[in-house]
Image (cartoon, coloured by chain):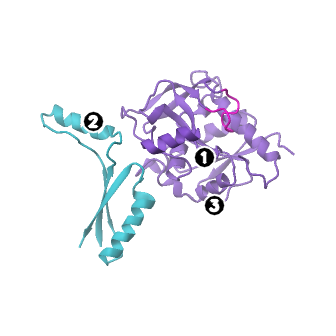
Chain colours: A purple, B cyan
Amino acid sequence: MSDARPRIAVVTFPGSNDDRDALLALEQLGAIGVPVWHGDEQLPEVAAVVLPGGFSYGDYLRCGAIARFSPAMKAVAAFAAEGGPVLGICNGFQILCEAGLLPGALRPNASLAFICRDVVLRVERADTPFTAGCTPGQRMTIPIKHGEGCWFADVDLAADLEANGQIVLRYEDNPNGSIADVAGVCNAYGNVMGLMPHPEHAVDPLVGSGSTDGALILGGLVEAARARSGAPAAAAAG
Amino acid sequence: MKATVLVRPKPGILDPQGEAVESSLRQLGFSVGDAHVGRVVDLEVAESDPAAARAEIEQMCRQLLTNPLIESYEIELQT
């Protein structure tokens, strides 16, 4: 039956630097964080996957462009195809876009500056595993820290995503020039989401500005993982 | 066979690097516009047939060297 503490993988790539923060935040929210090395061809028994922030492969070529070919990413893609919840944070978001698991691409910030500060996000959808603990229109304060977080989609793609409701989070005050103020998008099935802000840095009130709004997103992931741990293996999540 | 791949941001994409370079050039007194910053990849492929080499490099461009959503590319073969 459903695990009291669901197991959630956090994939470490060479150059990841928020992997331990993500593991700690997941532990604080009642999950068992399972470290996975990017060279692993198979995922351990887990009910959700987090791709953490950082600078995988030095951000060479394009952010996430090389990490997407890591052996672990094949397993992550297969896990996502079965309906498993996958959350990409910052560099993890960039990797998911490069891998084609999420729509769009991340470009250098419009200001060209690396931005590290709290931002206010607006929840557009509360029916994803990541925002199930939120209400539509809810505001959250979560930090960003990135140089290339300007999400881009061409006019047609952006219109499709709006129509499909794949824009999950928007900035109240766009910090990086992203199209349509997008801070986070999901795939068509809603089980893969990426966002530039760092929910793992807004879980423990002792860290950062004291906001714990990141727990809304990661807590949602933990709940989804818990539900999935209790579900029959053959059942695919929506 | 040696080849050069020129990668450019697609027209219409926000190109803050190009804008920064353009504004710096203007400050230096140059009369310029429409500056864009891309990337050059020099490489040497084992394939010696130009058509086959080009086809192989196009595959590299699609798989890794460019993101087709935001970048275009041009291949120059040194024959």
Callout 2 amino acid: Ala
Residue A168's x, y, as percent? 58, 35
Give the letter of the chain under mark 2: B
Determine if marks 3 and 1 fall on one subunit.
Answer: yes
Residue under label 2, please give it. B20
Residue at 21% from the left image edge and 34% from the top image edge: B24
Q: Nearer the viewer, mark 1 or mark 2?
A: 1
Residue A105 in view: no
Residue A26: horizontal and vertical position, in percent?
69, 37
Q: Secondary structure at mark 1?
A: loop
Mark 1 to mark 2 CA distance (whole Å): 36 Å
Q: Residue at x 61, y 56 (%)?
A: A72
Give the magenta-colored segment's residue range.
Answer: A125-135
Callout 1 amino acid: Ala
Q: What residue did someone put label 1 on?
A: A188
Instruction: Name the residue rendered at 28%, 46% in the picture.
Output: B37
Residue A136 x, y percent position in the rendering? 64, 27
Image spot of residue B4 (x, y percent) = 29, 62
- Quarter-wise, where is residue A108 in the image? top left
- Residue topped by disc 3: A41
Q: CA distance from mark 3 to mark 1?
A: 26 Å
A207 lies above or below A16: above
Q: Main secondary structure of the magenta part?
A: loop
* Crowd band around label 3 with a 10 angstrom C-alpha radius: few (<14), some (14–19), many (20+): some
